[in-house]
Amino acid sequence: MPSFIRVVETWVPSQDGTLLEFHEGLYHAAPHFGALSRSMCFGRGEGLPGRVWDAGRPLLLPRFEGSYFLRTPAAQAAGLRCAVALPCFRGEALAAVMVLLCGDDTVGAGAIELWHHDPRIGSDMTLVDGWFGDGSGGFEALSRDAYLPRGVGLPGRAWQSGEPVHLPDLQAEGARFLRSPEADAAGLQQGLAVPLETRAEAVCVLTVLASHHLPIARRLQRWQAGAAQPLYDTGEGLAGAPDPQPLLAGVVDTGVPALLPQPAGGTVLWPVTAAGQVHEVLVLGL
């Protein structure tokens, strides 16, 4: 069973700090896209990784056509529909840019949203942009008009806690997921919200929503820095999946995500930071 997140890649500053160079990638679902990507690098402000490096904040591309994305034909040929790039910090310095590319061309539904709160504008969190799959019209319209106070709704809960929030069954959440009826009509059944560090005053939260037929990931774990056991685990390990625990200390120390390939999918160790320090690692088994 495929996952909604199809491709993950990381880009790190070159030794002289002038470029972002390819670091690691999970391209099982898009091998030709991966072959192209491994040969590339990005200057500051160039392509999606370079734009994030320059802006110091996450950026979401709901479509590749007519955008600054430099690999559009290869992405489209692989069935990739949208991308979001996230800066990862260690102290004041950029440690890496992680790019997630998603698609729903096989079965089910999905959505990916970038929310932010800018204290100079107001007290609520609003949608920056999002990609919404076919049949998500009512859910998309509601999301684009929403104003979420701190602690309210899925993005607001991640904002308040400063930690990832995973809801495996949106309909069971009732009033705690404010868009539950519209999500149900769109076939969206599970959600993940992750707070994102920026180099601006604005607070950002990424939300990924998917169906049970095309899940966000096949397994999700939350590890607090230095912990011997996961804080949260959605289930048993995937067959043949590598153990992420030996790499946790390195991710916490460097702030650079780790990617573990396997014959189908792979494992992502995603550092969650505040003030340039990793306080948690989110592990996704794709």
Image: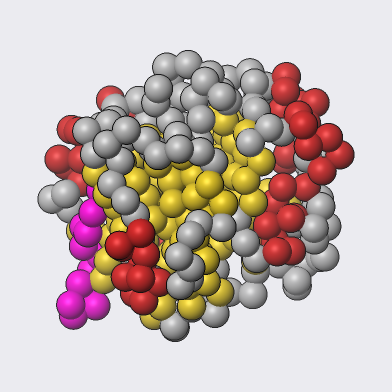
Q: Quadrant of residue 248?
A: bottom left
State the image coordinates of residue 197 (x, y, percent, origin top left).
54, 68
Q: In this view, does 257 lie to the left or right of 120?
A: left
The number of numbered discs placed on residues in the rendered structure image is 0
| Above or below: residue 91 compared with residue 209 | below
Residue furthest out toward the bottom:
92
Q: Is residue 220 left or right of residue 285?
A: right
Nearer to the camera, 91 or 42: 91
Q: In this view, does 79 lie to the left or right of 232?
A: left
Q: Which image quarter is the C terminus in? A: top left
| Above or below: residue 215 compared with residue 285 | above
Is residue 208 visible to the viewer in this orientation of the structure? yes
State the image coordinates of residue 100 (x, y, percent, origin top left).
41, 46
Residue furthest out toward the right:
175
State the image coordinates of residue 282 (x, y, percent, origin top left).
48, 55
Residue under the image location 81 percent in, 65 percent down: 122
Is 92 magenta? The answer is: no
Q: Is residue 273 left or right of residue 148?
A: left
- Here the colouring is secondary structure
| Above or below: residue 129 compared with residue 73 | below
State the image coordinates of residue 206 (x, y, percent, origin top left).
58, 51
| Above or below: residue 181 compared with residue 126 | above
Magenta range is: 14-25
Is residue 63 visible to the viewer in this orientation of the structure? no
Q: Which image quarter is the N terminus in? A: top left
Residue under the image location 32 percent in, 33 percent down: 239
Residue under the image location 57 percent in, 52 percent down: 232
